Structures are given as C-alpha cells and as structure tokens.
Amino acid sequence: MAVAQPRWVGTPEQLTHRARLSFRLTNTTHKPIMRAQTQPTAAKPVPKKIGVLVFPAFEPLDVMGPIEALQTLSWTNKLELCVIAPTLDTVSSALPETGPSVSGPAFGVRLVPTHTFATVPADLDVLIVPGGYGAMLPATVAPAAEFVKKTYPGLQYLITICNGVAIAAAAGVLDGKTATGDKATWNAITSAAPKVKWVKHARYAVDGNIWTSSGVSAGIDATLAWIKEVFGEERARKTANVIEYEWKDDKSWDPFAYVWAEDIDLNNL
C-alpha cells in the first residue's frame, strides 16, 4: 500500500526556515551534479643521473662536499655520477700562474672528466655547478653558462654551489627567481645579475627546481637539504651522521652574511 507523501500548506514565505528548505527540495527538479574525475598525479621519477660541472680553478669542496654526501646516498639508492667538462682533459682546481695564490698551479686536486659538454647523457637528472676562482674568469663562465642554458630545460634539478651561481645567472635561468650565493664575492655576483631576486642572509635558497647555496661548505648543507626533499628526512639525517657532518638545516642560518660586509680581496687574504 502506497504511503501518502505529506503536502505543504501555504507559500514558502509563510513556512519556517527548515520547512522552506524542505519545500524547495521536494518541489524543485534537480539535475545531478557531475563532478570532474581527478586524475592521480604521476609520481616524479627518482633522480639517478647526477652531473658535476668542473673547470680549471674550481673550488675543491664545492665539488667534493656534495659528492661525499651523494656517494653515501648511493649506498642505498642507485645513482650514477657524471663529471662534465669542455673536454676529457684532466681538470685541476689549482689557480693559474697569474692568479693571487703564491703556489699557483703547483697546488690543486685533479679530476678526470667522464663526459664533455657534447657527450653528456640526454637523460641527466641533476646538474651541480660549483664555484671557485675559475667561476670569476670570463673565459670559463661563457662556455659553462652556455652549457647550463642548453641543459637546464631537461633537468629535474639544478644545484649551484658558492659563486657557481654566477654561471647559472649568466645562463639566464635564474632571472626572476630567488637565489643566494657566496658571501665573500656577493657584490660582484649580484651586481652582474640584477634580474635575480637575491637573498643575502641564506645558507641556501630554493626556488622551484633550482637550489643555490652560500659559500663553499654551504654546498654540503644544500645537498643534504635536497636529499631530504627528494629521499626523505631520515635518509638525509643518516647521510649527515655517516659523514659526521653537523648539518645546518636552517636555510636562514648565515653568519657569513655579516662577516663579509665587503667582498674579499684575494690579493690580501
């Protein structure tokens, strides 16, 4: 037996708020609401191929600090290292004969590149750009910047260390982005790239897929922070503990922004 449906007496304006709502719901023809189906976001591939750019008079710790952390990471995560230079000739960190070092080319570490600018893998995931005395020399900066400009669009991440940020800035990939760099050469770096949003008080800075660090040892902090971002904090902490490094994981920690009120005079250390 059918159950009679209640009928509302009076106009909607004469009913209580709740009754009016019921009146509208029972006396209005509704169309079903079609909701767009949200497609799951594809997981970002885990970086595996990491390149380090080297050039004459590179800063050793800018290169070896991040590599130390990444080599420890490679024990638990499959990674491949590419050492990249214009040619396959051995590259020395030593300063040139005409540089400010009294030792000149007699003191420096030498690295053997695995790839040239022309043979770098097309599927390179990460590029690390160190600094050093060589990053102040136009003859070094120009080809390196051109390589960064060409390579950046295919990278998952770009990481610059110390005044290596000047190479990325010269490539134009930092225009409109937040970045930091070496404090001992801060004025020279920033004045040459006015389109960059420079942050002086920073151990490292992150803008999208670009990570930039302060001077020399700060590259280790930035690399550990990148490991935390990509592989998780536990892995980053374990990496720091294995290499017995006191990780400065506060990116605003930067006493050297005060130490270097003026740029360093390399001829008067």
Image (spheres, helix red, strand yellow):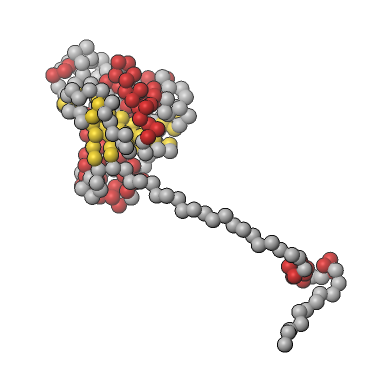
The residue located at (28%, 50%) in the rendering is: 235
Relative vertical location of residue 170 with respect to residue 48 in this rendering, above or below: above
The quadrant of the picture occupied by the C terminus is top left
Q: Position of residue 91 (x, y in %)?
A: 19, 24
Image spot of residue 230 (x, y percent): 34, 46
Residue 242 position, x and y percent, is: 20, 47
Instruction: Work out whether 182 lies above or below 101.
Output: below
Check the image and name the residue furthest to the top.
Answer: 98
Q: Quadrant of residue 182?
A: top left
State which quadrant residue 111 falls in: top left
Q: Nearer the viewer, residue 186 or 117?
A: 117
The correct choice, above or below, for 66 with respect to 92 in the image is: below
Name the residue at the front extreme. Answer: 1
> Is 266 or 190 nearer to us in this picture?
190
Closest to the observer, 79 or 102 = 79
Residue 165 visible within the image? no
- The residue nearer to you, when weighing 99 against 91, is 91
Instruction: Locate residue 255 relative to residue 111 in the image: left or right.
Output: right
The residue lying at 24 percent from left, 40 percent from top is 80
Taking the spot 21% from the left edge, 19% from the top edge, the residue there is 95
Q: Is residue 73 left or right of residue 210?
A: left
The reply to whether residue 66 is visible in this rendering is yes
Q: Is residue 130 above or below residue 36?
A: above
Number of callouts? 0
Name the image quarter holding the N terminus.
Answer: bottom right
Where, by quadrant of the figure, is residue 174 drawn?
top left
Question: In this image, 250 relative to 115: left or right?
Answer: right
